[in-house]
Amino acid sequence: MYDTLIPENAVDQKEIKINAEDVQVYYGDTHAIKDVSVKIEDKTVTAFIGPSGCGKSTFLRCLNRMNDTIDICRVEGKILLDGEDIYDKKVDPVQLRAKVGMVFQKPNPFPKSIYDNIAYGPRIHGLAKNKADLDVIVEKSLRRGAIWDEVKDRLDQPGTGLSGGQQQRLCIARAVATEPEVLLMDEPCSALDPIATAQVEELIDELRQDYSVVIVTHSMQQAARVSQKTAFFHLGNLVEFGETSQIFTNPVDPRTESYITGRIG
Amino acid sequence: MSAGLIILVVLLIACAGFFVGRSRAIATAGGDIRNLHSRPNYYGLTVALFSAAPALMIAVLWLLLQPLYIEGQVSEMIAPADIPEGGSLSLVMTDVRRIADGLDVAVDAGTLTEDRIEDMRADLSDLRTRLGEVGIAVASEVRQNVFMAAKTYRELAAKLRLAMAVIVIGASLAGAAFSLLRINPDYRARNVSEHAIKALLILSSSVAILTTVGIIFSLLFETLHFFRLYPAKDFFFSSIWNPQFQGGSDLGILPLLWGTLYVSFVALIFAVPIGLLAAVYLSEYASKHVRSFAKPAIEILAGIPTIVYGLFALITVGPLLRDYFAEPLGLGNSSSSVLTAGVVLGIMLIPFVSSLSDDVINAVPQAMRDGSYGLGATKSETIKQVILPAALPGIVGAVLLAASRAIGETMIVVMGAGAAAKLSLNPFEAMTTITVKIVSQLTGDTEFASPETLVAFALGLSLFVVTLGLNVLALYIVRKYREQYE
């Protein structure tokens, strides 16, 4: 598995973007996340791996307060974005989500045209002064989503008419269009075929230059291919967090080793 | 043997056939049902089907054709001289049937015997009183030929009924025997019974379709009849509605159509925004607790009989609108008005719009909401820009369905809008609708040959065409955009 690792993965220590300390999450009476502390660096891809139901998606959704939309969900502990607690009463989750974008497991383009899908975020946040501005943002975002060439001639067609892989790249472009600082991806490739997966992975690697990317994945190969940091979750605990190369080659915790070698999961 | 009894016997044979077939199947398999192609119940079911289905079909056909055959035979016995002046053969035939039935009743009651009926030839004066004693009133004096026809009618009917019993029960037994003989372990009883079930399903759905077709045709024939008596041009383009039962009336549909559309429009203006906003609140903002209470509460509105809404319009809304709006504004002094009917009709439609829209909004995938929230959109932005557009086809369907309801509503309009056919823009004036006029043209002592009565069918057909068009439009819109977010 190591041969898929890229030497560049070993990078220097970077600025901390998100600092989570002793995070607890409860769904009603269920204690879903226990004492998770993680430091997510800027301009880095951080992968969350672990067996199903281990809490990695739940933790990801805490980072932009998507769990607020679930009534029975309760979050304790501190999550600092650039040193500010995002669960502070002063913070508006709507503004937070503009800074921390999210891409979901299943591609979910809106039933609108490709153009309107991308323009949705910039419009509601007032990022464009006029139509020409908006056109520029849409083109830039589609280029960043590596899908411009495929859709530039049919921007007025519905986004739902694209193939699965194109839809997911459209959703990534849509998230990028609001100029977030962090991009959260919840199993972005699980509904895609291998070719589309490769395209999205390539895109994630490019996005690393500007954003802090956090990706939840079931595929350990994918984590090894795209991430620099990896966190292994098990039964709601953060078992191990470190350099991807170290996690995959020389895990400290026996549970990590069992999972990576396929004995638990 | 009466028809009911025959059918009961057939069903009993089928029942018995089920159990015999079932045990015979088990016997042919040597007691081990794994040797059978199908489960034993299916073998029983095929026997039951073969004994009941063909026999019942014959019975139904027989019951349909028997009266036609008898009438054909008997009507030859009626001479033209027997038909009273101004009457028709069918009236005389009605008399024949009544006398025949009366004779049956009289024999059952013991006031007449078969022998006496046979002898009753020259002296018929007795017959009326005899029939009167058993509660059968014969209108005029019974003529010789009519009485003879009635007697033949009785004899034929009795003979045919016996024949029917023999043939139907025979068919049932033959079917049972045929299918019992076919039973062997390789017989595909399950497939046969499933075919029969499929036929039953097809029959059920075609009943609904055929009924629609039947309704259209019955309307269509009467409408054509009407247009033969009254010019179609005047009906569709005249702006005067003034039926005179002594003839020479003006029967223009335009004032009625205008009233219908005006009242429906007011109702929708009232119901659509309220219903839609209620649906948005219920599906997006209300907590589970509120929703579980509020949704059934709104739907109770749909269960109130329209006549009760009509009372509400008559005694509450009408006077209220007149006293606080129409009179101060100088727009009229009638408590029945378009606005009264429209508002109350709108209240009735709120649950239609809100309940259907609520279902449609709930059907928008959670992924759409997540996607929008994930981009930093607020709840109201999400609803306005993502959820409502995605749910739009369904909402349009709900609105058009409500419109069809509004156009077809009668009771509220009778009591709320009055009965004056007028072409006016003033919403405080009394107007009337197509449905109200259909009722008023058909109630009371009317003969079914004058244009004043037949116009009801033309009105009904016009209404049907309008609502059918709306329903087709609704279906088309819903179907065209349904799968957009998948």
Image (cartoon, coloured by chain):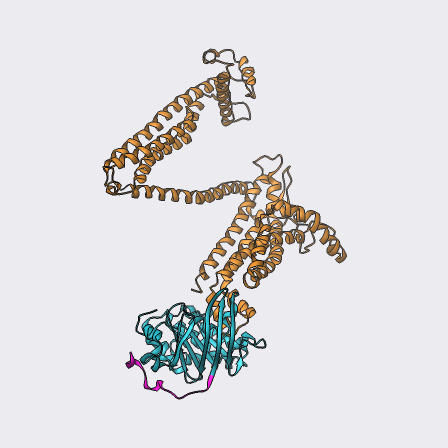
Chain colours: A cyan, B orange
Q: Is residue B16 visible?
A: yes
Residue A2 relative to residue A181: left or right: left
**At which x and y percent is residue B345?**
62, 52
* Total numbered badges shown on the rendered structure: 0
Boundaries of the magenta span? A1-16
Q: Which residue is found at the position 41% from the left and 87% from the top?
A: A13
* Viewer-nearest residue: B469 or B46: B46
Magenta-drawn stretch contains A6: yes
The percent position of residue B293, horizontal first and vertical second, equals 58, 55
User: Which of the two residues, B37 or B358, is positioned nearer the viewer here?
Assistant: B37
Image quarter (top left, top right, bottom left or bottom right) of the C terminus of chain B: bottom left
Task: Tell me where residue B174 sits by quadrant.
Answer: top left
Q: Is A88 left, or right, of B1 in this rendering?
A: right
Q: Is residue A36 above or below residue B192?
A: below
Looking at the image, which is closer to me, A37 or B45? A37
Q: In the rendered view, tell whether residue B449 sits above or below residue A164.
A: above
Looking at the image, which residue sits at the far bottom? A12
Q: Where does the N terminus of chain B fall, quadrant-wise?
A: top left
Is residue A157 in sight in this rendering? no
Q: Nearer the viewer, residue B43 or B411?
A: B43
Residue B187 x/y as whole percent: 25, 40
Q: Vertically, is B4 above or below A147?
A: above
Residue B332 falls inside the magenta stretch: no
Q: Where residue B277 sits in the image (x, y, percent)? A: 59, 61
